[in-house]
Image (cartoon, rainbow, N blue to C red):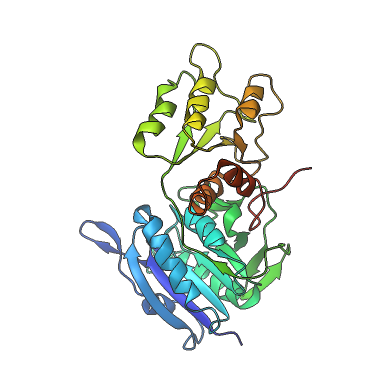
């Protein structure tokens, strides 16, 4: 049997009612004691007890280092985490822990595990089963579904099936203490751990009538890279309010600009419509079918490696950990 490690970071699953509202206070051991079965062989670690709205790059590094320190001694790792930023954490860990030889399964809940009707206990039980069954990689286990970490997005605020696998098949499902594999992901081999990231990345979501100055202000805000959520396949204003010119100014200042879509499913590209063709000529980087969370965290990770625009472009358009479908 694999030795499993449980790492707690807080989140709703660890919350208890207080006078000021729900607060994450349960330890990893206390969470483990809420589920069925003999789990005495699971090693418990408490990193911090935080609402995931407060999880930031500093915490990503702490989590990644805690996981790395267990590689070689653990057969699988479960990380409990709040749902609100879970997809960002899962995506960033996918890059930081590229090629990890053991499974890292992130889970949490929509209701505190101490509640009688909580989904937290089932999710934790399922994550442990998955950590004993999966190959190396970073995953999210939630609502009986297993997803590749860099492809998962939180799509619902209260429903128990809060996460979906976007543009990628679900990895499997867990039920009645057993995992059913549905898809075998092709993931990198050779563990390359790195926490060198640059969090100075901005996300700009376009809306009709938005001033280009809101894009250009990134130049004055010590931003090193920008992800733009454009319309549909990648359209943006080119009349009256010229977003294209704003993008040009960012790139002239050496800021890589990554184009993604406000649509969850399928790829973004500037190549189809006349209105967005100039973006290709400007040298904008297409995010393809990456999720916004993956595009943002990947850009942070890439900028931690290089300042060279062509290297940034090459890495952003290369599938590294299953985050991107490379189209012919």
Residue drawn at (61%, 78%), measured in percent from left and top?
132
Q: Quadrant of residue 278?
A: top right
Residue at the image point whose x is 60% and y is 53% from the top: 151
Return the x and y of residue 311 as percentages of the image width and height.
Answer: 60, 47
Q: Is residue 10 above or below residue 250?
A: below
The extreme top residue here reads: 240
| Residue 177 visible | yes
Quick check: 314 above or below 256?
below
Is any atom of residue 142 visible in this view? no
Give left or right: position of 199 versus 293. Answer: left
The quarter of the rendered structure image containing the C terminus is top right
Q: Position of residue 148 (x, y in %)?
A: 62, 59
Q: Tell me what residue is drawn at x 63 percent, y 70 percent.
A: 175
Which residue is at 46% across, 48% downward?
Answer: 157
Quarter assignment of residue 130: bottom right
Q: Residue furthest front?
A: 308
Q: Residue furthest left?
A: 19
Q: Foreground residue, 82 or 202?
A: 202
Where, quadrant-wise, is the N terminus in this rendering?
bottom right
Of 156 and 316, which appears nearest the observer?
Answer: 316
Residue 70 position within the rendered picture, expressed as x and y whole percent measured from the top left: 49, 79
């Amino acid at each position: 049997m694999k030795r499993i490690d449980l790492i707690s970071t807080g989140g709703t699953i660890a919350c208890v009612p207080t006078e000021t509202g729900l607060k994450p206070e349960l330890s990893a051991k206390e969470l483990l004691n809420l589920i069925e079965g003999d789990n005495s062989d699971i090693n418990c670690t408490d990193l911090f007890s935080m609402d995931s709205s407060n999880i930031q790059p500093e915490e990503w590094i702490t989590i990644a280092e805690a996981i790395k320190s267990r590689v070689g001694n653990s057969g699988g790792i479960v990380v409990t985490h709040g749902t609100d930023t879970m997809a960002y954490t899962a995506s960033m860990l996918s890059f930081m822990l590229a090629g990890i030889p053991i499974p890292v399964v992130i889970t949490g809940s929509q209701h505190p595990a101490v509640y009688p009707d909580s989904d937290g206990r089932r999710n934790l039980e399922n994550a442990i089963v998955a950590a004993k069954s999966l190959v190396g990689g970073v995953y999210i286990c939630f609502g009986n579904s297993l997803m590749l970490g860099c492809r998962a997005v939180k799509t619902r605020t209260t429903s128990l099936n809060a996460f979906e696998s976007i543009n990628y098949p679900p990895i499997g499902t867990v039920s009645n203490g057993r995992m059913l594999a549905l898809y075998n992901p092709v993931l990198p081999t050779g563990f390359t751990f790195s926490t060198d990231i640059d969090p100075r990345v901005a996300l700009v979501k376009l809306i009709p009538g938005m001033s280009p100055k809101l894009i250009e202000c990134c130049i004055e805000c010590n931003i090193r890279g920008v992800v733009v959520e454009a319309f549909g396949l990648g359209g943006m204003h080119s009349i009256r309010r010229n977003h294209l010119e704003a993008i040009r100014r960012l790139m002239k200042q050496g800021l890589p600009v990554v184009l993604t879509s406000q649509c969850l499913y399928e790829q973004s590209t500037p190549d189809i419509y006349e209105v967005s063709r100039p973006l290709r000529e400007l040298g904008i980087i297409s995010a393809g079918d990456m999720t916004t969370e993956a595009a943002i965290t990947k850009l942070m990770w890439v900028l931690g490696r290089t300042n060279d625009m062509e290297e940034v472009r090459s890495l952003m358009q290369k599938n590294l950990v299953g985050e991107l479908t490379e189209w012919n």
